[in-house]
Every structure is written in C-alpha cells, then in structure tokens.
Image: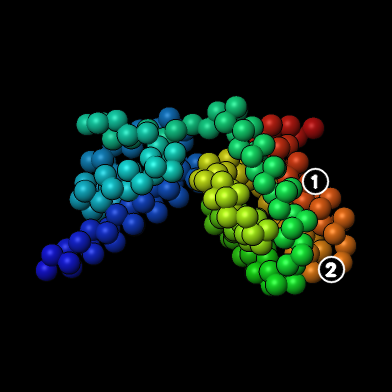
Amino acid sequence: MCAATNLTRASAADRAYAAVKRSILSGETGAGDELGEVALAERLECSRTPVREALQRLQSEGLVRIYPKRGAIVVPVTAAEADAVWEARALVEQWAAPRAFEHGTAIAARLHADVDAMELHRAVGDVVAFTEADRAFHEVVVDAAHNEHLTRLYRSLRERQLMINATAMTLSPERMDAAIRDHRRLAELIATDDLDAFVALTASHVASARHAIDGDDG
C-alpha cells in the first residue's frame, strides 16, 4: 500500500513537473509570473505535495525560485545570462564539431531522426517539442566528441538553453525553418568527408543562435 502510494505521488509529481515546465517554455507562463501551490494543485487536479515536489525540481533546474508560503516565481533570463549561455554553448559545440565528425557515420541516422522530429513539431506548431528536438541534435554531436566533462557542462546548460531558444522561436517562427535547414545539412555533412564544411556550418549555425538572443532581425 505504501509503495503504491509513493508511486502514485511520484507519477503526480512528474505530471505536475511536465505541465509547469511546458507552460514556462512555451511562454504561457512568463518570466516573473507567480506559481502558487494551491492554484497549481487546483488547475492540475492533484494535491499540493506533488506540486511542491515539481517546483523543487524546477528550482534545481534554474527555471523557478521558490518562496516559502508563497509558491514560486519564474526566473527571467536576463540579457547577460543569455549571452553567457550562448558563449558556453559556442565553446563546447565548436570544440566538439571536428571530434564528433570522426564518428559521423555512426551518429548520422540519429541526427536525421532528430531533424525529422523537428519537422514534425514545426508542422503542428509545438515550439517546446521542437526546441527539445533541436537541443537533442546538438547533444548527440557533443556526446560523440567523447569528453565526459564537457558533456556534463553542456548538459548543465540544457534548461536555460531550452528557455532561451523557445522564446526566440516563438518570437520568430521562421527561425524554426532556418534551424531545420541547418540541422538537415549538418546531418548530411557529418557522413561525408567534408570536415571543413561541417565545422564552418556549425560555427555559422551557432552564430545564428547569438543573433536570435540579441533579437537583431536586421
């Protein structure tokens, strides 16, 4: 009975976590918005305990900040933080590109599958799922470089990167089309012998992420 209760609570906490996180990444819940435990529990039709556990998990990912007896507030991404995330991402992805290229034929199919997922999510307008597939693509490349320390560093950027990218894609849906084109070409190039082209496109693709962060559409 106790084990079943714990399993049910864990399942409710997972559902609450997924629902609140999607709301944040989609922009439905914006930076600075309050997330009250009681209101969330009512909306999600669960008790306050799984909501509290979900908020604690989101706080550990840097998406919310919990205030005792109040609930939580969505942590905004400042321009300085977005820039810092971009710099860290650029360093890791551009370092990983030539090393991952050596294993290109082994990961090309996985990369194409991620691009297929991006196209599917773009077609139905699911920005959150699109952004997650986008991030998964790059994580495959970074993993293929076989440096566990940099892989851990890259994974630590995931949640804030998702929030930044989802915001950029929502503001300019055309960026999703451009991202699909770049990712598809990268997946094609990594299975060829054209290392220079793969590295160059990686650099320009990462630079376009900086462009999205800056919000300069000129």
Residue at which label 1 appears? 204
Between residues 142 and 79, which one lies in front from this camera angle? 142
Label 1: which secondary element: helix
Q: Position of residue 59 (x, y in %)?
A: 38, 40
Please rate how many residues cluster around mark 2, counting C-alpha atoms within 10 Å: few if below 14, some from 14 to 19, many from 20.
some
191 sits left or right of 152 in the view: right
Between residues 126 and 188, which one lies in front from this camera angle? 188
Label 2: which secondary element: loop
Residue at 81%, 53% in the rendered image? 199
Which quadrant: the N terminus? bottom left
Residue at 23%, 53% in the rendered image? 46
Residue at 80%, 46% in the rendered image? 204
Question: The disc labelled 1 sits on which kind of residue?
Answer: Ser
| Above or below, 180 relative to 90 | below
Residue at which label 2 appears? 192
Decide if residue 103 is in sight here: yes
Mark closest to the chain's N terminus, 2 or 1 = 2
Which quadrant: the C terminus? top right
Query: Residue 121's image quarter?
Result: bottom right
Question: The disc labelled 2 sits on which kind of residue?
Answer: Thr
Q: Where is residue 84 in the image (x, y as percent from the top left)?
A: 62, 33
Residue at 17%, 63% in the rendered image? 5
**Residue 172's mark?**
none
Between residues 43 and 5, which one lies in front from this camera angle? 5
Decide if residue 122 is in sight here: no
Query: Residue 58's image quarter?
Result: top left
